[in-house]
Image (spheres, grey):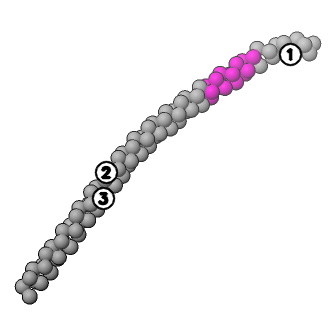
Amino acid sequence: MEARRIEEYMERIRVLDALEQQAMGLSRMLTTYTDRLQERLEQRVGIEEAAEGIALGSIRGLAEEVTRSVEQKRALVAKCHQLDREMQGVQTVAAK
């Protein structure tokens, strides 16, 4: 009877040892997965920061081009008005 109890006790120890080994394996796998996830998240943050920088640079460049275009249009309109004023005398002469 005592030998049977010892054998049952040893079997329980083996089962607990196997469970502990499985738990340790699962823990290592979980650690590996979380480390990979963290790496990917850090990569994604870097990519998003770079994309944001590119987008902001593009927006600034576009704004500068629009500003230059508006300034050129104003200068062209001013020259047209000046040419109109200067040509009024020619229209008077042409009418005579």
Give me the residue at 43% from left, 41% from top: 47
Viewed as shown, does residue 91 lie left or right of 64?
A: right
**SS label for mark 3:** helix
Residue 82 in picture, x, y percent from top left = 72, 18
**SS label for mark 2:** helix
Q: Label 3, on which residue? A: 30
Mark before the other along the chain sequence, 2 or 1? 2
Q: In this view, does 39 lie above or below 25?
A: above
Give me the residue at 41% from left, 45% from top: 44
Q: In which quarter of the image is the N terminus?
A: bottom left
Mark 3 neighbour class, 10 Å CA radius: few under 14, some 14 to 19, many 20 or more: few
Mark 2 → mark 1, Cα distance in angstroms:
82 Å
Q: Are marks 3 and 1 in contact (CB under 8 Å)?
A: no
Residue range corresponding to the magenta coloring: 69-83
Mark before the other along the chain sequence, 3 or 1? 3
| Circle 2 or circle 1, nearest the eye | 2
Tag 3: amino acid: Leu
Viewed as shown, does residue 53 lie left or right of 76?
A: left
Tag 2: amino acid: Asp
Task: Answer whether residue 84 is visible to the viewer in this image.
Answer: yes
Give me the residue at 90% from left, 13% from top: 94
Tag 1: amino acid: Gln
The verdict on residue 29 being magenta is no
Which residue is farthest left? 2
Residue 30 in picture, x, y percent from top left = 30, 58
Q: Label 1, on which residue? A: 91
* The image quarter in which residue 83 lies: top right
Q: Label 2, on which residue? A: 35
Mark 3 → mark 1, Cα distance in angstroms:
88 Å
Q: Do the residues labelled 2 and 3 touch (CB within 8 Å)?
A: no
Task: Answer whether residue 45 is visible to the viewer in this image.
Answer: no
